[in-house]
Image: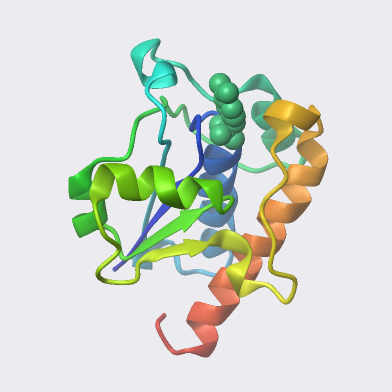
């Protein structure tokens, strides 16, 4: 079982988008039973108010026919670091926020999602741009590249 945790700031836009897109890709590849997939954020407000997935991310799921269930924002915990094999962050600023909570990345589990693509960069943040479609393109590229890397390296 490969355990993957996607992490952004609020856990309402980008990381749930990545969670359900990656879930869809692995299901399509017939690898659904080989993965545990979840998402989390680094700031507490959305957990406090029990926030669900942002309507912009929901629209993307509907538009692109990506199955999803409800997900309520939660903050990453130290136990998540021990439990998950890959902690995939959306942008470089997430790294420090994750490290503040989990301590050191002793097992080299924290990676930028787009680290696996040929064009290393952060995922564009729709909270500020309002453009969920370009975020979808970034996330899809990152998820595809990550899955391809796992397959190429014989991890699944
Ligand atoms: P996310 O988007 O990190 O992709 O879930 C954001 C959600 C909330 C805020 C920023 C980004 N915020 O500043 O409250």
Residue 13 visible in the snapshot: no
Please state, as top left, top right, bottom left or bottom right, where the C terminus lies in the image.
Answer: bottom left
Q: Is residue 147 above or below residue 55?
A: below
Looking at the image, which residue is at 50% across and 29% down?
10
Give residue 41's position: percent from left, percent from top: 43, 36
Q: How many marks?
A: 0
Q: Nearer the viewer, residue 119 or 134?
A: 119
- Where is residue 151 shown, x and y percent of the image? 51, 82
Pinpoint residue 75: horizontal percent, then vertical percent: 34, 32
Task: Say which of 86 and 110 sits in front.
Answer: 110
Identity of the residue drawn at 51% across and 41% down: 8
The N terminus: image quadrant: bottom left
For ligand 1, the image quadrant comes to top right
Going 73% across and 28% down the picture, which residue do you hit? 128
Q: Is residue 20 left or right of residue 43?
A: right
Note whether 56 is above or below 140 in the view shown: above
Residue 81's quadrant in the figure? bottom left
Q: Is residue 11 left or right of residue 48?
A: right
| In the image, residue 47 above or below residue 64 | above
The colour scheme of the drawn protein is: rainbow
Whether residue 33 is visible here, answered yes or no, is: yes
Residue 73 point in image, percent of width and height = 42, 26
Residue at 48% x, 33% y is 11
């Amino acid at each position: 079982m490969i355990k993957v945790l996607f992490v952004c700031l609020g856990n309402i836009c980008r990381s749930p988008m990545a969670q359900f897109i990656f879930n869809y890709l692995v299901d399509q590849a017939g690898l659904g039973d080989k993965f545990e997939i979840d998402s989390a954020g680094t700031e507490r407000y959305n957990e406090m108010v029990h926030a669900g997935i942002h309507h912009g991310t929901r629209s993307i799921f509907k538009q692109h026919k990506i199955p999803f269930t409800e997900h309520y924002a939660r903050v990453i915990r130290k136990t998540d670091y021990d439990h998950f094999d890959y902690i995939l962050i959306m942008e470089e600023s997430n790294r420090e926020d994750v490290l503040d909570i989990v301590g050191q990345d002793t097992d080299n589990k924290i990676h930028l999602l787009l680290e696996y693509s040929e064009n290393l960069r952060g995922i564009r943040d729709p909270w500020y741009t309002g453009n969920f479609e370009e975020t979808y393109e970034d996330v899809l590229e990152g998820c595809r590249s990550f899955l391809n890397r796992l397959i190429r390296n014989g991890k699944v």
